[in-house]
Image (cartoon, grey):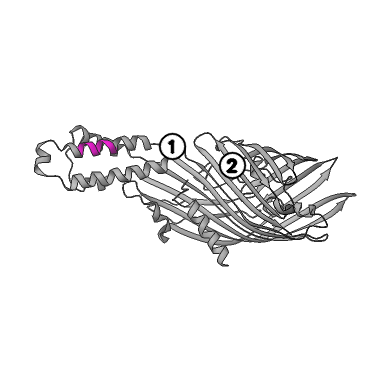
Amino acid sequence: MVKTLFMRKKVAYIVGFNAVLISSSALAAGTWYDARNDAMGGTGVASSTWSSAVLANPALMTKAQPDDNVSIIFPSAGVQITDKDKLVDRIDDITDTVNRYRDVINNITLPDIINGYPQVKAAAGDMADQLRGLRGNKANGTAGVALAVSIPNETLPFAFITKAYGTAHIRANVAESDIDYLQGVADGTVIPAPGDQNRLRSSANGLAALITDYGVAMAHEFSVAGHPVSVGVTPKLQKTWLYNYSASVYNYDKNDLKNGRYRSSDTGFNIDAGIATDFAENWTFGVTGQNLISRDIDTKEVNGYRDTYQIRPLVTTGLAWNNGPFTLTGDVDLTQTKRFKSQESSQYAGVGGEYRVLDWLALRAGYRADMKSNDTDVFTAGFGVSPFNNTVHLDLAGSVGKDNTWGAMAQLGFNF
């Protein structure tokens, strides 16, 4: 329980408006990060190993070999950020400028007025320029972490999974009247007075969602017309925290996300499911459905604004080819990835490959694209090492794309 709470708080911090206030470019396929699969274009529906199948497609847990015993993922973690306009830094910058403007206008002296209050004009001009740069700016990000224990057997392999994943979105709403007023002060056509800055209306709005799943996955292989087909399900308890933060850019404080007046929560039941089958030679086909029970969860109303977070079924199909040291794979979402109602949805396709150079070293690369063109497409790459006779598995991955998009993933696993 202590570890779970620590994990949830860590993801809340990442997703919150601190280091990663930033959802749209979600490399993780909906609700999980797996460094091996993420390095291969965010795939995994047909290409996951049995030890990480609980993250992507529980049906693949049946692929464990007779000499496999227990696998522990501790942890799998990742983050991806898109901040084309460097919005977070700009809001911090304007906060500093606001403080300087307040200081000079509240401490204006008679000689300053006689001289035309040059410091006030300079500070107002800086604020006007920064607001022009903020117009239309937004930033997005995702983060996730998971812990899992998988126990294979011939009849009913099962796994315990706890994962927390989140998405955040911030946008700047600039009032043109603020720019006109500040530029008038800078030009000397408007005479400022103490307290005038409190009438400015430009704001920063942030939305974030943190979802924590606690589940038990089970899988079984059936014979359908003489052909083996594996089916896996993960019933889970789902806890959701939503954050609706709204503040004037002149009073913005990213630490206010911790304030309860911006936060709401909800608890419900959900389920993931998947199927997988091998066909022809070296080919695997899979389909997964995540969050098969739809839920709409409202944020708190803040400053007259309320949004709704949408949990919707995400169905993905995958195909993988394995031959010796090579794996090639591709995944395609059959449904859209939904988020807050105010955000555009996405639908991903990814391709990737792995080359196992040595028994203990694998190299990976891939590409992931949003077929709806609302998120940034990314190139991915990574590697995995398995020292100590494959007892320990360390996988690292990264992603990069346009619009100042980058991501990093790491996973540590133990097989016994």
Compared to 279, does 211 lie above or below?
A: below
Disc 2 to disc 1: CB gap under 8 Å: no
Q: Which residues are magenta?
A: 120-127
Q: Quadrant of residue 153?
A: bottom right
Residue at figure coordinates x 63%, y 51% from the top left = 411
User: Observer-nearest residue: 257 or 225?
Assistant: 257
Residue under numbered circle 1: 85
Q: Main secondary structure of the magenta part?
A: helix
Q: Quadrant of residue 182?
A: top left
Asked if residue 260 lies in the magenta stretch, the reply is no
Tag 1: amino acid: Asp
Precedes in sequence: disc 2 or disc 1: 1
Tag 2: amino acid: Gly
Residue at figure coordinates x 56%, y 56% from the top left = 211
Any mark on residue 398, and which?
A: 2
**What percent of the width, then of the height, locates residue 311?**
58, 52
Residue 231 appears left or right of 165: right
Q: Residues within 10 Å of mark 2 (few under 14, many from 20)?
A: many
Residue 160 appears left or right of 142: right
Foreground disc of the pair 2, 1: 2
**What percent of the width, then of the height, locates residue 215?**
66, 61
Residue 152 in view in this figure? yes
Asked if residue 125 lies in the magenta stretch, the reply is yes
Residue 67 appears left or right of 271: right
Q: Residues within 10 Å of mark 1 (few under 14, many from 20)?
A: some
**What percent of the width, then of the height, locates residue 238?**
60, 60
